[in-house]
Image: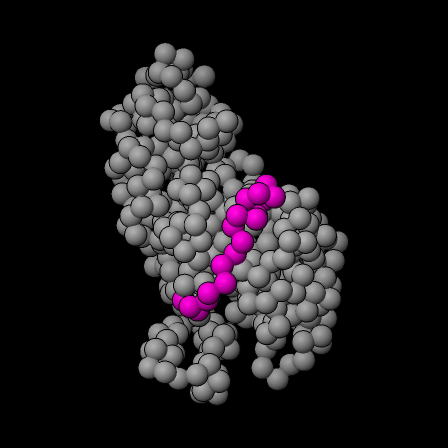
Amino acid sequence: MTPDLLITDARLVRLRGPDPCAAIAAQTVAVRGGKITFAGDADGAPAAGAHTQIWPAEGRLLTPGLIDCHTHLVYAGSRAAEFAKRMAGASYAEIAASGGGIMNTVAATRAASEDELIAQSLPRLDRMLAHGVTTVEIKSGYGLDLETELKILRCARRLGELRRVRIITTFLGAHTTPKGAEADAYIDDVCIPALRTAAMQGLVDAVDGFCETIAFTPGQIARVFATAQALGLPVKLHAEQLSNQAGAELAAQFGALSADHLEHVSADGIAAMAAAGTVAVLLPGAFYALRETIKPPVAQLRAAGVSLAVASDSNPGTSPMTSLPLAMNMAAILFGLTTEETLQGVTRNAARALGRHDIGAIAPGLSADLCLWDCTDPAELTYRIGDPPLHARIFEGQAC
Ligand SMILES: [Zn+2]
């Protein structure tokens, strides 16, 4: 089959096979209809036709497009003023008393029109894309009422139409209990009905929750997950970020795609995740911004064979970050991941954390989501502190 696009003389990192992070020189990638049809030595490549675009990579590094598998990208307002107060010594209680914290973002997001929400979120998305991202997961969770949760998910879908990027939506109604409500009543009377409506409208790809002393109990999360299961939707969980709630075990019990944060995960939690094939999504941005000291037990996760992913956790409160390569650098420096692990963490393991088998590697049949970098060593992507040498981003076979 004649390719639409031939990328020649690339230093290819396939993220497949026994040495997935090896960079192999002088490789060719062929693309047709937005999909990879060939990746390998030039002499085995399909011949170019009259309409084939030929792109000489001139020895540059070619990797899969990066996948940010955990973000809260769609919200209104800023928490910079609150950050300034906190840095000047104000306590969390004082900030909460003056209207700060997550409810600050909820109020701004409820008040924003859909167009305003898009206008505020699009520049954040653009910065992510400028750092090589081709797939972004976006969670709801700043609405905490039916209408606003739907609005956030609609905005997330619209962002995917406004830019050449794949958006995957996650319903996170169980993010926090809105002011004045009681947690059990909120879960049963608002969160679960909102999930059913959002799913019916085709706005939900997965379901998430926040299992923590300051959020929801495992029992409350289990009710949300049971609903997700009945709707045929995969689940994931914000688990063991600030304390151990046996959230990892709960996630594994529901066959979760991922358990995220995991600073306080136990040996039992790790074993349960390994048995269920649940990916550990590490979020060093929030760890850094909260000045946490307990790190996720990377060595134990590794030893148990749990796949490690890395994400930006882009959100206004605890990780106002839009650079996935910065998260890669932080995961290496703060958590001790190798540069191979950080690269796998934003490609093939991030794809697993989203339940996707068509992205995250360079192989025939997969979507032609690719990044061409002005370097030859894959370690450069993690080594530079949030300043990746992106040369070109290719989404479904088209440069953008
Ligand atoms: Zn999060």
Q: Nearer the viewer, residue 218 or 31?
A: 218
| The quarter of the displayed image where residue 8 is located | top left
State the image coordinates of residue 77 (x, y, percent, origin top left). 40, 73
Residue that extends furthest to the top in the rendered view of this protein: 43
Where is 381 relative to 281, above or below? above
| The quarter of the displayed image where residue 45 is located | top left
With 318 as the anchor, is 262 left or right in this view? right
With 311 as the anchor, is 51 left or right in this view? left
Task: Tell me if residue 305 is in the magenta stretch.
Answer: yes
With 206 as the anchor, is 74 left or right in this view? left
State the image coordinates of residue 259 (x, y, percent, origin top left). 59, 54
Q: Quadrant of the C terminus?
A: top left
Using the rendered image of the protein, determine whether residue 387 is visible from the camera's viewpoint.
yes
| The quarter of the displayed image where residue 57 is located | top left
Figure disc tally? 0
Task: Tell me if residue 22 is in the magenta stretch.
Answer: no
The residue at 42%/68% (across/down) is 291
State the image coordinates of residue 19 (x, y, percent, origin top left). 46, 28
Where is 288 relative to 1, above or below? below
Q: Nearer the viewer, residue 59 or 306?
A: 306
Using the rendered image of the protein, determine whether residue 153 is visible from the camera's viewpoint.
no
The residue range painted magenta reads: 289-306
Where is 329 relative to 215, above or below? above
The residue at 67%/80% (across/down) is 182
The residue at 70%/57% (across/down) is 250
